[in-house]
Image (tube, rainbow, N blue to C red):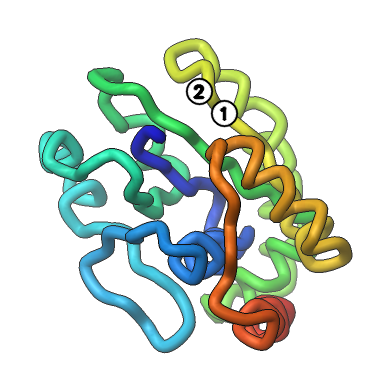
Amino acid sequence: MSLIIVSGVPRSGLALMCRILDDSGVEVVSDDTLTYGYSETAKLREGDSAWMRDIPDECAVKVFYPWIMKVPVTRKLEIIWMRRNSRNCAKSQRAFGGKSRWWIAKATKEIARINKSVPDLLRVVHPRVTEISFDELIRKPNDALWLLEEILNTPLVTKSVKTLGESINHATT
């Protein structure tokens, strides 16, 4: 298995995916673990991608867009691109960021543009990019887990269905 990068725009389900991976035995590398969620590493936000060379394969790291575009092409990666309904994602960002209502329409268009173009751009240099829909993960978690098993070529056993349910319930609020 390769290093796993979980990416997408903020509030698109990155922390939920990291939690699923973590509960399945994949080590998620992070500066700190929040109550619900995983922070991306500050080094990458600051433009330092060299630290990624030291992360062992079979680990995962959360990398928000646009920082995913700075990930080095020096090793084989599995990129999981999380996408979410653009309007719902923008509304969630607004709720967490205190943005004004007019901002939602603008953000919805930008999120849709990012979700349409960025995965294809990433595939130019990283051929293993898989898109997973947050909305489908919520509606049909077993289908998403099956897809993850296919991507990672390993069975995923979450700690418990209750943990997955708690993660999904938190992600939808």
| Residue with the mark numbered 1 | 129
Residue 132, picture quadrant: top right
C-alpha separation, residue under disc 2 versus residue under disc 1: 7 Å
Q: In front here: 50 or 164?
A: 164
Check disc 1: other Cα within 10 Å, few if <14, some if 14-19, many if 20+.
Answer: many
Q: Would you place residue 30 above or below residue 167 in this image?
A: above
**Three-letter amino acid code at the position of disc 2:** Leu
Residue at 60% across / 36% down in the picture? 151
Q: Is residue 44 left or right of residue 168?
A: left
As drawn, the label of residue 122 is: 2
Q: Nearer the viewer, mark 2 or mark 1?
A: 1
Q: Is residue 74 left or right of residue 1?
A: left
Decide: marks 2, 1 in contact (CB < 8 A)?
yes
Residue at 54% across / 77% down in the picture? 159
The N terminus - image quarter: top left
Residue 101, picture quadrant: bottom right
The C terminus - image quarter: bottom right
Q: Earlier in the sequence, mark 2 or mark 1?
A: 2
Q: Position of residue 48 (x, y in %)?
A: 14, 40
Label 1 SS: strand
Q: Position of residue 130 (x, y in %)?
A: 63, 33
Label 2 SS: helix
Residue at 44% across / 66% down in the picture? 22
Q: Position of residue 15 (x, y in %)?
A: 51, 67
Q: Would you place residue 159 above or below residue 153 in this image?
A: below
As drawn, the label of residue 103 is: none
Q: In front here: 119 or 52?
A: 52
Q: Position of residue 79 (x, y in %)?
A: 49, 35
**Three-letter amino acid code at the position of disc 1:** Val
Q: In front here: 75 or 49?
A: 75
